[in-house]
Image: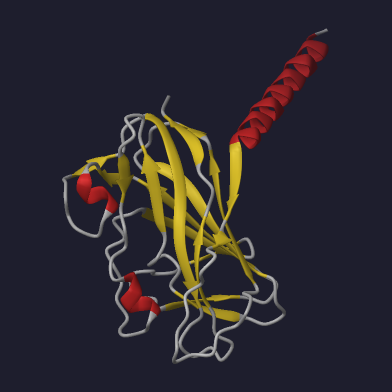
Amino acid sequence: MKKQALGIIAMIIVICQFNLGTLFAQKVRELPFKREENPVKLESRRTMDASPLSLKIAMATAQPVSGQGLKFTLVITNNSSTEISLYNPLIALTPWLINEKGEYISFSNIRMSMDVNYVTFYVPNFEAFEIGDTFINGKKHEVDYHTSETINIPANGTYQVNLSVLNVRVGPGATSDHMGSAINKLKKGRYKLSFRASISTARTEKAFFVYSLNTPEIEVDYGQ
């Protein structure tokens, strides 16, 4: 009888764990990046008509308040049979948030146009987000995005960076590259969120491409 009771308890625990995992999985959304209609053109470089890469953001649409902020993951997939060297993709990645008052909360990584045109290598302080772990084909890798001009995406491989929004600006300065308001911690609430990005190959790549991308908008509950 005691064994049967223990067996029932163990089964209930397994079922509860499954249900919680399923519930969490249902809240995770994948936001594919789409190319803007007018791609960036550089007169000094021959550009490809299409990129062999696909990009998306994966994130839970309901998250508790934490010391890391609102978490999300950038996923880059190389659909070609050759390794591709990319210009540091975090430099031109920007999350755009709108709070419940309709105010824009955002950071832009400045000097993006300078980077895209390869005038110089400039790494911002990444105040748009916190940088977490990097995984290449599921294996953890140490990458310093503050000093790395390029990253390598293996052939038919997947590159994943865990990120989060923690510090924000509210007000006129939030939608520009100028310091228009004070930095605040992201407060709990319901937000509308989308992402902008620019993706380009490294200077050394012969098959060159550079594209501006964006995701659709979603609603996210942070600590609600």
Q: Position of residue 71 (x, y in %)?
A: 45, 45
| Residue farthest to the top, as pictured | 1
Q: In this view, does 209 lie above or below 5?
A: below
Q: Where is residue 69 in the image (x, y as percent from the top left)?
A: 37, 41
Displayed quadrant of residue 56: bottom right
Which of 27 and 32 lies nearest the eye of the viewer?
32
Q: In this view, does 79 lie above or below 102?
A: below
The residue drawn where x is 81% and y is 14% is 3
Which of 169 and 145 lies nearest the eye of the viewer?
169
Quadrant holding the N terminus: top right
Q: Is residue 186 rendered to the left or right of residue 75?
A: left
The residue drawn where x is 36% and y is 53% is 130
| Residue farthest to the front, as pictured | 38
Q: Is residue 70 rendered to the left or right of residue 166?
A: right
The residue drawn where x is 53% and y is 88% is 205
Q: Where is residue 4 in the image (x, y as percent from the top left)?
A: 82, 13
Q: Is residue 83 rendered to the left or right of residue 111?
A: right
Q: Is residue 185 rendered to the left or right of residue 165?
A: left
Q: Position of residue 224 (x, y in %)?
A: 43, 24
Displayed quadrant of residue 84: bottom right
Which of 104 and 223 lies nearest the eye of the viewer?
104
The residue drawn where x is 45% and y is 43% is 193
